[in-house]
Image: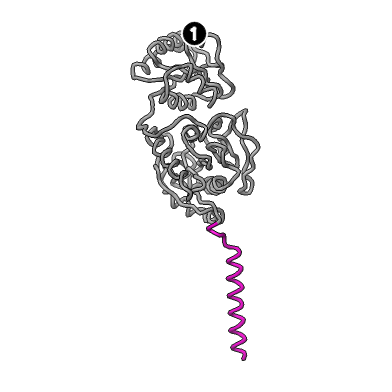
Amino acid sequence: MRKRLALLLVVLFVLTFSMQAAVAAPDDAKLPSVKILATGGTIAGKGASSTQMTGYNPGAIGVQVLIDAVPELKQYANVSGEQIANIGSFAMNNEVWLTLARRTNELLASDDVDGIVITHGTDTLEETAYFLNLVVKSNKPVVLIGAMRPATAMSADGPVNILNAVRLAGSKEARGKGVLVALNDQINGGRDVTKTNTTHVETFKSWELGVLGYIQNGKPYFYRESTRKHTTQSEFDITGLTKLPYVEIVYAHTNHNRLFVDAAVNAGVKGIVHAGMGHGSMYPATKEAFIDAQKKGVVVVKSSRVGNGMVTRVAEDDKLHFVAADTLNPQKARILLMMALTKTSDPVEIQRMFDEY
């Protein structure tokens, strides 16, 4: 009798524990499906010691290792990963961009994918984010993240950024907001965000225009969104593109000359972005070079090296057929100009695009 009673108690304990585990365990069928596309960078970096914060080897760790390092992901999403590239983002190029964009669009067109997270080096993360903001054709969330400390570092910021990004990419709140950048518990838009500090974890900011929202305890809170065209509203399409038009940036300074403008024209550029002084101002000798370049069919866009504020059209721009970059910094103006040149070389039409995107 005692043996039967003991056996019954064991069975009841096992059943109770199993029921509690079933309640606690996430229902995989109800969890969002999030794909992580890895491109390398500091978030996948490896240093010689836990205190090495610079001079490490970026992109040394594969995507599955990054996923396995954050087991909490399983509570919030069905996560799988793909390795698109494994480079430091200082080596990012148009070929990787096109591959990444095509794979992103392919995955988002599937009912099996609810959102995408892209791990990326921070040096050019803002540029990839804006490029994707122009060419992704889905309202589903696309979230770019990186890290300012390598994966091997003490207090590495990569794991929490991955967890936050997966929860953001799987959320309904992030749909239709355009391509997002989520580091340091902040949500920024791909158009406006920029890297503002060489090493600090709070480096990504949208300057005066501000963050879109925050991530608190893994939950996204949005307070604003961009009014500029993006993703499904965009007229740009990479279908059939094998390369992007050649566009360079020329940086302004005192005692400037026409050397780099002429060199760019001789190298066959289709467009040049001028990182001008103040409100896009040009040094006199450089201005003459830009006028000559425009007469040869090169599209000239006036941006600013300042980092904040608008570059608006002035009366002279109509005469010289220059384009004003609005609030886009030089590196993002270059991306929009490249995409614009896939459709037209008319500066009037390209100005319309800069006014809308």
**Magenta stretch prevailing secondary structure:** helix
| 31 vs 250: above or below | below
Spot occupied by residue 349 in the image (x, y as percentages of width and height):
48, 19
In the displayed structure, would residue 28 be above or below residue 284? below
Q: Label 1: how many residues lie within 10 Å, few (<14), some (14-19) or many (20+)?
A: few
Is 211 a magenta residue? no
Q: Quadrant of residue 267?
A: top left
Quadrant holding the N terminus: bottom right
Q: Can you tell which quarter of the image residue 257 is in?
A: top left
Residue 40 visible somewhere in the drawing: no
Tag 1 residue: 319
Residue 269 is situated, as x and y percent measured from the top left of the image, at 37, 20
Residue lying farthest bottom? 1
Left or right: where 247 falls relative to 50: left
At x 42% / y 34%, what residue is drawn?
90
Q: At 36% across and 33% down in the image, what residue appears?
A: 240
Q: In which quarter of the image is residue 222?
A: top right
Residue 19: within the magenta?
yes
Q: What stretch is highlighted in magenta?
A: 1-29
Drawn side of residue 339 relative to residue 226, left or right: left
Q: Is residue 222 left or right of residue 89?
A: right
Q: Residue 7, percent across and down? A: 58, 84
On the image, the x and y values in percent for residue 193 come to 55, 32
Q: What element carries label 1?
A: helix
Kind of residue at badge 1: Lys
- In the rendered image, the residue lying farthest to the right is 223
Q: Report the front residue among 307 and 292.
A: 292
Q: In the rendered image of this protein, does residue 80 appear above or below residue 178?
A: below
